[in-house]
Image (cartoon, helix red, strand yellow):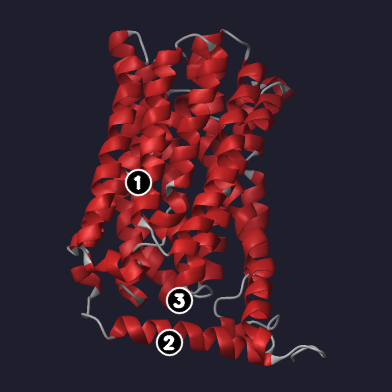
Amino acid sequence: MIPAGQTAAGLDQRTRKRINRRLLPFLFVLYIIAFLDRINVGFAGLDMTRELGFSDRVFGFGAGVFFFGYVLLEIPGSILVELWSARKWIARIMITWGIVAAFTGLIHTATQFYWARFALGLAEAGFFPGLLVYLTHWYRDEDRGKAIGIFMSATAVASTIGAPLSGLLMQIHWFGLSGWRWLLILEGAPAIVFGIITIFYLTDWPQDARWLSAEEKEWISEELRREKALRAKGPKVSVWATFWHPSVLLLTSVYFLGNAAQYGFGLWLPKLIQTASGFNTFTVSVISAIPFLISWPVMLLVGWNSDRTGERCWHTAFGYVLAAAGLAGSLWAGNRIVAGVIMFSIAASGLNSRLPAFWALPHSFLGGTAAAASIGIINCVGGLGGFFGPYILGALSSSTGSYAAGVWCLAGASLLAAILVLLLNRTAGNRNSG
């Protein structure tokens, strides 16, 4: 019921605040756990490659092959969240990937490393697009960019806390197992625990929320129905047609390039810092947190400003250009570690700040199941960039003896993505998004 002393005039603000307090902190924690399990191999690799005798090419392939498993269930996973149950699907994913993540710490050969990373990707498939689709059940178009920015800023927080945490865990040598093994084993446990909690904590739809009053349920449900009806007046797009929708194809290409840069940078950052500085594993882990710590407020600011202005494409392009500048600048910095960290911070700020406005775009030109499918398609095919970025950097490093060529490739990918996303200004989807 509406609390005493409050009027219907404040119903919208009250409902949005209650939804934010209930959902965003929890989704934030879930994404921190997911991202930690995805990137901790970058820190494990500081010692794992030496112990197991892996070359940069082997490590780059194993780090990236995660995404081949990851893409297989992306599209059906996104649709299941829309048509079945978000909380059950997300809980299933988390419990499964927590178990697989822990077993990754027991590998001994390159082949085992490849299969463990592939299985981890398969287990986590559908998690991220599922969360994006879930947000559309609760947030209007005008609020969604900020919500995405808040929960996706977990990537910056995960990298910030994950770096020193990984450094500490790698100091453990219980039962004769190396620290990098304990890092992978122990960081899998939170996914299992929170997967179980998810079943009881999340609510699939506003009308099922016991934590909202009847008036609040009706207000947000009516707002979302109104937006859906407005989109329905436009051209009908089937799930199958979504695969060939021009804007979906363009966004998929943009996301592919962005993922190549994001994961090429993120998974190799500890080794880039170690090569430039010569510092020990723990010091490298602590320094690796700095770029992501700085990127957090930048990501939130870009997401907030994108919602305030209603503009998406230029905000996304800004992030990509910033990333390209930081990556190129890191080569100029060379072995000057302070200058290098500044440039890495610029790159991280760009790579993370591109995401809130980008993920608000699919629902600006599609709705319902087609929008859910588009998110799955973009994340599925575009997600393969997460393989090519780490692999190309590792392969070029093995071939040339330097990381420079690989970093130039990542910078070029970011700049090309900035150009492509601006082409959306020619589409009806972008006109709808403001």
Read off the residue under disc 2.
226
Q: Is the Cβ of the residue at disc 2 closer than 8 Å to that at disc 1?
A: no
Q: Could you tell me the amino acid type at mark 2? A: Arg
**How far apart are the alpha carbons under marks 2 and 1?**
30 Å
| Residue type for callout 3 | Trp
Mark 3 lies on residue: 84
Q: Are marks 2 and 3 in contact (CB under 8 Å)?
A: no
Q: How far apart are marks 2 and 3 (CA)?
A: 22 Å
Q: Which of marks 2 and 3 is in front?
A: 2
Looking at the rendered structure, which numbered label has been put on residue 317?
Answer: 1
Q: Nearer the viewer, mark 2 or mark 1?
A: 1
Q: Dot 2, crowdedness within 10 Å: few (<14), some or many (≥20)? A: few
Amino acid carrying label 1: it is Ala
Q: How crowded is mark 3: few (under 14 residues within 10 Å), some or many (20 or more)?
A: few
Q: In which quarter of the image is residue 226?
A: bottom left
Q: Which mark is residue 156?
A: none
Indicate the secondary structure of the residue bearing disc 1: helix
| Front in this rendered view, residue 228 or 200 | 228
Earlier in the chain: of badge 1 and badge 3, it is 3
